[in-house]
Image: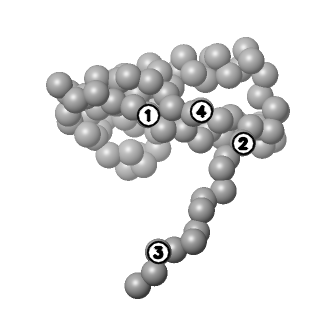
Amino acid sequence: PVKSGYTPKAVQSDGTVDSITTEEINEFLTTFFKLYPTATAKELTYYVSEGVLKPVGKEYIFSELVNPVYNRNGNQVTASLAVKYLDN
């Protein structure tokens, strides 16, 4: 076996989302990911389509959004990011 030479393409912002919208999205995502680890399936249906995200049921502590990139596609904004949690 040989190690693969594949490297994923880095996601970059195309500049279509202004700073005000970016700040609003960051506030929403921060709030959502603070609540997500302890949210029940019923609570998650208020934020996402049913079954898209499964409940975690852990006491993780939200730390930060890592490398958020936002791009606009018509009326929708797509986000690519990672979330950093701390475990008790």
Local crowd size for mark 1, using a 10 Å CA cut-off: few (<14), some (14–19), many (≥20)? some
- Reading the image, the residue beneath label 1 is 83
Q: Residue at x 60, y 59 (%)?
A: 8
- Asked if disc 4 and disc 1 are in contact, CB closer than 8 Å, the reply is no
Q: Secondary structure at mark 2?
A: loop
Does residue 15 lie above or below 31 as drawn? below
* Residues at marks 4 and 2, CA–CA distance in whole angstroms: 9 Å
* Residues at marks 3 and 1, CA–CA distance in whole angstroms: 28 Å
Q: Residue at x 80, y 39 (%)?
A: 14
- Of badges 3 and 1, the one in the foreground is 3
In the displayed orientation, state which residue is furthest to the front: 2
The three-letter code of the residue at mark 2 reads Gln
Does residue 71 lie above or below 35 as drawn? below
| Image quadrant where residue 45 sits | top left
- Asked if disc 3 and disc 2 are in contact, CB closer than 8 Å, the reply is no
The three-letter code of the residue at mark 1 reads Val
* Residues at marks 2 and 1, CA–CA distance in whole angstroms: 17 Å
| Image quadrant where residue 12 sits | top right
Q: Can residue 76 be seen in the rendering of this structure?
A: no
